Image (spheres, helix red, strand yellow):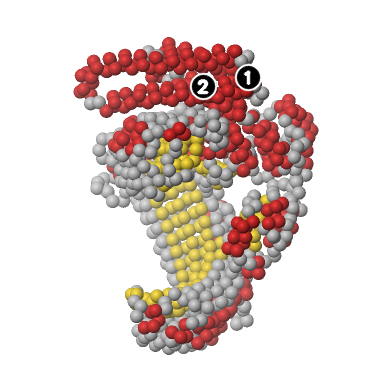
Amino acid sequence: MDGGISAAAIEVLVQNLINVFKEEYFLLRGLDREAQQLQKTMIMVQAYLSDAETKSITQHAVKIWLRELEGIAFNADNVLDELSYHLLHNNVNKMRTPKGKDKVLSFFSSFNHISHRRNMAHAIEKINATFKSMNKRARDLGLQSILVNAPVPAPTASTETDSITIDPIFVGRDDDVPKLVQMKGEDYAKTYLLVLDDVWNEDVSKWEDFINSISGVTSTEGNGIIITTRSQRVASIVDPLEIYSLNGLSDADCWSIIKAKAFLENGEVPSRFERIGKKIAERCQGLPLAANVVGGLLRSKSEEEWRFINENWLSNDDEAQNITKILKLSFDHLSPPSLKKCFAYCSIFSKGAEMEKQKVIELWMAEGFLQLDERYKMESVGNKFFDVLLHNSLLIVAQRDIYGDVWSCVMHDLVHDLASSVLNGSHNVDGITPVRYIVHEEEGPVPKEVAKHLRTLFFKGITSVSMFSNFECLHNLSLTSSDCTELPNSIRELIHLRNLNISNTRIKNLPEWIGELYQLQTLRALCLATQKLPSTLKYLIKLRHLHIDSHVELPADMGRLTCLQTLVHFRVGKEKGYQIEELGSLRNLKGRLEIRNLERVRDKEEAIKANMFEKSNLSYLVFHWNEQREDESRSDESVLEGLQPHENANLKVLKIEGFKGKRFPTWTQKMAVWDGLQGSYVPLDKLFSITFRRCSECEEIPMLKHLPNLKSLILQRLKKVRVINCSTNHLTDLTISGLERMECLPDALFYNNRNLSNFMIYECPLLRELPDGVDTLNSLEQLYIRDCPNLKSIGNPSVQSQGILSTLRLWISGCGELKEFPCEMLESWAPSVEYLELRGLRSLNNLPELINCLSKSSPRLAEMTILGVPNFMASSPSVEGSGLDRLKELKIDVSVEWSEEKSVSIKHSVDVLLEGCCNSLTHLNLKGVHKWEWIPQSIQHLTALDWLRLENIGVEELPQWFWNLSSLTRLSLYSCNKLRHLPSVDALHPLTKLVWLEIKDCPELRIDPEWRNNVTVYVDGRSLAAA
């Protein structure tokens, strides 16, 4: 594979050199003649590469020629890059020079220009001569000149979220699933299931250490461990209870995978392709990875190409060789050559490492792998390359963001092996080819002979001021060090540097000389404690991505950075250089942008200077006005009107915060922007999430019904909104808070949004009721209702059931007028509830029925809080608490509307609850009444209890059985007015784990001084020192 990646690497370098001379500054400086000559020579070099790649496999002399050519190309790249740096330096000097000095310096600069032009011309001529000699050697070696122009794949929007990248292909394991489930067991109350996937370690001693470390985790406690491995020796070493061997997939299953990857979902497969495809499936020998990879390779290929792959590349070798051949086949078909280089470069990350997509693309770009194209920016080419690697199963999606877009990926170990093997001279040093990409985790500096050739360095360790002086060619530098608090001064010398990542350090400030790194494209500094970046940042005129924390203030004149694409936040200032017009020239901004301090923008005319209508690549927009304003004269409506987004914007998130206009401007009201060419409004129909926060003067919510992709809506502190008259049909998340004048919600809210998973409503003092249908939500995961003091109903139970939910968390608190929580609702939710909180519901009249319902069947319930709710008792004396065997935390208050008549029922209900969770409960908070002269005896059976808090209990001393709570580590006693003394220290011996005693408002209690020597004691917030 050596020749293939060498040719690809050289192809990338050569194309970059050709592109350099297309840049304007070479032509403007009278170097067009030299540039054209070198371009012609480089095109001839390109022509020999295809033949050289083929012949290098069998001809050692050609392989040597390729290696020498690669070294020459790298050197030429460095020379021309240095010339580019000096040209940028001159441009920056012009920016720095006051206008009054221009004429004084012009006489001297003309001489410097002539001298510098001669030096550049000489350097270019020398490079040209070297490449000409390599062309002559190519002819002497008998290499054929073949002009090939492989186009860069055009980026497409559809590949981001299609079914192939999601890869939902599950076949061929129907018979295995029940057997594996049987191995897991039928006990649904298991505590741990540990899965060790794809294990290869055959070190017996390490396995023994591992087994000893988890010796307490036994299957009798409901725990399980599953290990997957391709090594029979590993399977025997771990000594499992059972070994289950997975057979290979059937040929039919392999064909179904290939078909799903090669053709569009549910696409018809022509019979001529099916015949060839089934033969290829047979040669996959039941290997899922092989079928997956070859399926991606066959996509969009002709019938002839399918035949070629079947007849020439796959053979019935053993498993490892077969997969290697298929992977190599997929690699060989990557086009253009720069894509091969991008793939191989990914092996610089360790096996199994998660690679963040945006970071990887920035690294590729800094290395020059993403060549400039007239149609597409480098980042667009990088996105396309990423998608191609995903389609070919050379990368696997690890995480997606909330919009379904790929966030990060991983490489299969076998694919990583392939990438490492083709990264010529970088991971696997052959002693001849210089190392150019490394991760340095060893103590001490990188050797000088290695450093001078490096283009990528991930450095993990202790840094020093001068340690980077020897890195003459570095393009990518990532520092990871908790000891690094200042940016090493020697980084100043890295004139080729394009990507600097210091986010994983403790560097607090950036030095002023950061502005001398003129080639820098990406700066990641998510670590800075400084309040402001240095003023020289404006000289980084090649900067495309700036990743900093939101608290860091930008310097003046950010508008000079016209290449900038990533700028997460911008604070509008008062002075020149900080005003909103700085955004006007940043036409390439994409992704997320937060504009803050909009109260400093005077009117629409000033807002228009931001040119938001030209920024088509923004997907996340935040418009923010501060509540505290120096000038209360409001022009918010006209300012927001002037910030209208681009008509073709890919806008997914819109947040408007602190807006004090009475009405939203037309584009916001309609959620559509005016297209002057079409003479109509274009809906912002890609919006996924909308937030209106602290828009205190607005009385109406904009129209939202026409937004088919809207999933999340947040309405907060809209003090004058009385009615939510916007209709939505696809929400999954809805948050409403601080709507002080709103009395009701839309009647069909829940029926129209059946997929609502998260519903939060709080601090709405006039809200009287929720509409019917909350119990018909088939994806509900969280229901949160708080501080709605006039809420009387949460809706009537529906006849139609929503089915069993996966998990559900319920909060209802601070709703003093709520009279009933319908039992039918809780009964339908009980099998799914994992958290329940009922607090401050002084009018609730059916708590006994709710306790009955929970006690019968709540198999997922882990935390329950019932405080400030009257009548804590079960409605039926025969109820059992067997349905609470997973409950771990319980907070209950039995004091509300307590009476002597109810005392026995309350005591029984408490005992029922505690008996039902006696083996699982770890935290208990019990608030009783002063007249209780006993503590529930069921507490003594709580074998797992770790923390006990008793409040308002009327006992004078703790019962003897209390000291049998052997798991107890923390005891809190609050407002126990009659409690006089604790047992002697001798009685503590069974409580071997008790380390903390907290006492508050227990006026009669006297503590033996010896207690302080055994546990940490706090009384009314003060620590009692040991005696």
Tell me residue 292's x, y (percent): 68, 40
Q: Is residue 506 visible?
A: yes
Q: Earlier in the sequence, mark 2 or mark 1?
A: 2
Question: Which residue type does callout 1 highlight?
Answer: Asp
Assess disc 1: are there few (<14), some (14-19) or many (≥20) residues with their C-alpha within 10 Å of its C-alpha.
some
Question: At numbered mark 2, what does the secondary structure look like: helix, strand or loop?
Answer: helix
Name the mark on residue 1022.
none
- Residue 6 versus residue 863: which sits nearer the camera? 6
- Residue 603 versus residue 989: which sits nearer the camera? 989
Could you tell whether 790 is left or right of 250 in the image?
left
Relative to 524, residue 542 above or below: above
Q: Give the residue displayed 63% in from the left and 64% down from the top.
A: 223
Q: Is residue 669 visible?
A: no
Rendering quarter of residue 885: bottom right
Tell me residue 135's x, y (percent): 55, 14
Q: Give the residue displayed 43% in from the left and 87% down from the top.
A: 984
Q: Residue under circle 2? A: 14
Q: Residue under circle 1? A: 51
- Residue 320 versus residue 546: which sits nearer the camera? 320
Could you tell whether 731 is left or right of 98 in the image?
right
Assess disc 2: are there few (<14), some (14-19) or many (≥20) residues with their C-alpha within 10 Å of its C-alpha.
many
Tell me residue 545's x, y (percent): 42, 36
Which image quarter is the C terminus in? bottom left
Relative to 659, residue 804 above or below: below
For the residues bearing labels 2 and 1, Cβ distance under 8 angstroms? no
Which image quarter is the N terminus in? top right
Question: Which residue type does callout 2 highlight?
Answer: Val
Relative to 787, residue 989 above or below: below
Q: Give the residue displayed 35% in from the left and 14% down from the top.
A: 118
